Image (cartoon, grey):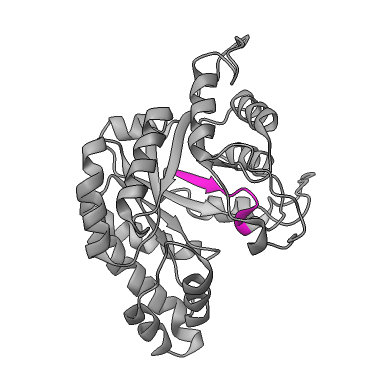
């Protein structure tokens, strides 16, 4: 099931996100791996689940294999693919492999820098960036590789991309968004934003592109996490009011507070977008009550 088909029907789309384990996930008749169980736990509340690709540059099970396991479990995956770890040959091969294995949705990313991860001496590739990756993926969908050679069979992938509404200057981010659309992006998931005014400003400018946009809701679990984001993640700012609210409760009460804050943000942002993408970082049990509330 392609997300583009849901958007075309006017469906308000919900997606979640899981991170593959750091290890082999051979099932052999045993219970499904943790990330599959997490995807199954939200299956009835989201239309699809992003499967991250060495998120934050931390080495894990490959996103394609993990996406296939999620699909086999009956949950629609969105296969995330980053430019950080692959050259153009590997990227094209991976996209064709994804289509061959039954994946319908792909999110094309540049990828977090190596310095954020657990292999800081690794050599980053970045042979192409996310705009070029979208162009490559669009070409594969049209039956040709990056240099124009014909494929025996084209891919058939719905192509997603990411935009950062909190990036300054915003006009440069909008220019990049426009380029991504020109090169093949069919829907967007945003980076985390916690200020409705900043988000509204972005949406009013992005509406001209007439492409589905999903609000990215990253659950902030603690003041320490907020501090890390503010110091290390470009273009994302956790505001002081949110940090103060988390600090106002004891650690054992922060999950409930995070739910309260996330629900409030989801209600404020939902009227401006065509869907919400949850980034729960393991707190996927927060997704059902928020979706239930939004669906009424």
The segment highlighted magenta reads 48-56
Residue 114, visible in the rendered structure: yes
Question: Residue 45's spot in the image, x, y percent?
Answer: 40, 51
Q: Is residue 247 magenta?
A: no
| Residue drawn where x is 30% and y is 49% of the image | 171
| Residue drawn where x is 26% and y is 53% of the image | 202
Quarter of the image with the N terminus in it: top left
Q: Is residue 93 left or right of residue 213?
A: right
Q: Is residue 122 left or right of residue 186?
A: right
Q: How many marks?
A: 0
Q: Is residue 51 magenta?
A: yes
| Residue drawn where x is 26% and y is 62% of the image | 198
Which residue is at the front of the view, 206 or 81?
206
Residue 75, visible in the rendered structure: no
69 vs 277: above or below: above
| Residue drawn where x is 74% and y is 50% of the image | 123
Question: Residue 160's spot in the image, x, y percent?
Answer: 44, 38
Question: Residue 116's spot in the image, x, y percent?
Answer: 63, 63
Question: Residue 273's spot in the image, x, y percent?
Answer: 26, 48
Quarter of the image with the C terminus in it: bottom left
């Amino acid at each position: 099931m392609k997300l583009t088909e849901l958007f075309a029907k006017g469906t308000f789309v919900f997606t979640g996100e899981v991170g593959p384990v750091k290890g082999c996930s051979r099932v052999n008749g045993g219970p499904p791996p943790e990330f599959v169980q997490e995807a199954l736990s939200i299956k009835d509340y989201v239309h699809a689940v992003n499967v991250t690709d060495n998120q934050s540059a931390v080495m894990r099970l490959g996103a394609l294999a993990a996406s296939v396991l999620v699909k086999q479990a009956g949950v629609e995956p969105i296969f995330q693919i980053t430019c950080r770890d692959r050259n153009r040959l590997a990227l094209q091969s991976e996209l064709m492999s994804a289509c061959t294995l039954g994946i319908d949705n792909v999110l094309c990313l540049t990828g977090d820098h190596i310095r954020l991860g657990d292999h800081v001496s690794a050599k980053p590739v970045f042979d192409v960036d996310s705009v070029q990756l979208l162009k490559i993926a669009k070409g594969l969908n049209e039956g040709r590789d990056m240099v124009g050679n014909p494929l025996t069979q084209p891919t058939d992938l719905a192509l997603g991309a990411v935009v950062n509404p909190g990036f300054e200057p915003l006009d440069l981010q909008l220019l990049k968004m426009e380029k991504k659309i020109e090169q093949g992006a069919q829907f967007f998931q945003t980076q985390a934003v916690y200020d409705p005014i900043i988000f509204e400003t972005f949406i009013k400018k992005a509406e001209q592109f007439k492409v589905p946009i999903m609000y990215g809701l990253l659950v902030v679990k603690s003041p320490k996490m907020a501090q890390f984001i503010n110091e290390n993640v470009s273009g994302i700012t956790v505001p002081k009011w949110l940090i103060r609210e988390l600090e106002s409760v004891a650690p054992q009460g922060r999950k409930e507070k995070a739910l309260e804050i996330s629900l409030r943000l989801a209600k404020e942002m939902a009227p401006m977008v065509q869907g919400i993408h949850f980034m729960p970082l393991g707190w996927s049990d927060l997704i059902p009550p928020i979706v239930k509330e939004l669906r009424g």
